[in-house]
Amino acid sequence: MSQPAPGPRHFLRDDDLSPAELVEVLDLADRMKADRHGSQPLAGPRAVAVLFDKPSTRTRVSFSIGVAELGGYPLVIDAGSSQLGRGEPVEDTTRVLDRQVAAIVWRTFGQERIEAMASVSRVPVVNALTDEYHPCQILADLQTVIERKGSLAGRSLTYLGDGANNMAHSYLLGGATAGMHVRIGSPEQFQPDPAVLKRAADIAAETGGSVLWTADPAAAADGADVLATDTWVSMGQEQEYDARIAPFLPYAVDEEALSRAAEDAVVLHCLPAYREKEIATSVIDVPQSAVWDEAENRLHAQKALLVWLLERS
């Protein structure tokens, strides 16, 4: 009796990759950066649907170019102008797409939306950002740290800012999977989700890494190999800016924070950056800043991820 075909692999949050699988994807990303047109598994072209519920620059550019460089056709859809925007169930849209595309990439709101898509999809589904996680960004960040530092395991990564947002959660899970020592410095009222912190701690126990939340920004930054931040006001919160920023002021990645980090610390920011808010211009524009390499590496890391997922689906 024949065995049923295996289902597709999805990438919905950072811990969907095991530590060994993360290494495979990052190694492939490095090779793809060295030879951008050397692999074209989507030749035909096969299409990849790239859906956007939220505005985007880096995600839209990197996935569109990446799919094209893999020999495919990027079918970019602003979800608000599709039937999704008129209330069609996520599962129904998915059942239409998965008969015509090789993979689906979605930048959306709640994590439950992309999980609903993956639950019925017959092709890989990739989280291009949700309110809870931003795993593709972390792949690019880890690739960037390897380029600057040569390795990940045992390195300390400090994130300062909103500890309850998607970047903090993905740094915890992705950094722990890579065997890093992840420290989140944030105000008391903006702590990481306890379930995410626990999951990251469990992963770190297996990889030799560690995770820590602290309200003390100086303690978080001390000796860090990598110093990262993100905007204090996520998409959809712009009207709350003035009310939100006061608690975050001590957590700015400025010259004082950088002076506490390791002498050769690498600075990361997923962009867009609000200069002189969460990050100082004097920090984002210095040689220690890898922000522009980080933005470029979205292209290479995501190409590698798509190829890896397709090969295992």
Image (spheres, helix red, strand yellow):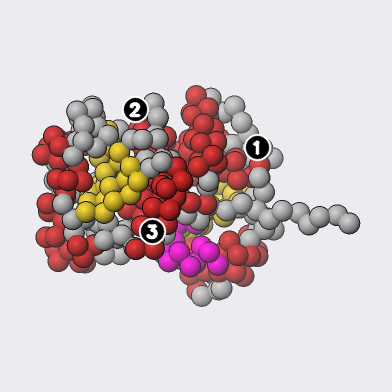
Q: CA distance from mark 3 to mark 2?
A: 29 Å
Q: Residues within 10 Å of mark 2 (few under 14, many from 20)?
A: some
Relative image position of residue 296 (x, y in whole percent) = 39, 35
Magenta highlight range: 106-116
Element marked by disc 1: loop
| Rendered residue at 33%/35% (across/down) | 155
> Answer yes or no: do the residues labelled 1 and 3 have beta carbons within 8 Å?
no
Q: Report if residue 115 lies within the magenta region.
A: yes
- Where residue 156 sits: x, y (%)? 30, 38
Q: Amino acid at mark 3?
A: Lys
Instruction: Tell us which disc is closer to us: 1 or 3.
Output: 3
Q: Nearer the viewer, residue 190 or 85?
A: 190
Q: Give the residue number, with chain letter if any, for mark 3.
A: 198
Question: Helix, strand, or loop for circle 2?
Answer: helix
Q: Amino acid at mark 2?
A: Arg
Residue in the image at 55% along x and 36% along y? 24
> Residue 76: x and y, percent?
52, 52
Mark 3 closeness class: few <14, some 14–19, many ≥20 residues within 10 Å: some
Residue matched to label 2: 148
Mark before the other along the chain sequence, 2 or 1: 1
Q: Quadrant of residue 309?
A: top right
Residue behind mark 1: 41
Of the image marks 3 and 2, the number of the one nearer the N terminus: 2
Separation (CA) of disc 2 from disc 1? 29 Å
> Foreground: 182 or 266?
182
Left or right of 192 in this view: 38: right
Q: Position of residue 4 (x, y in %)?
A: 78, 57
Q: Answer with mark 1 or mark 3, whichever residue precedes in sequence.
A: 1
Alpha-carbon span between mark 1 and mark 3: 38 Å
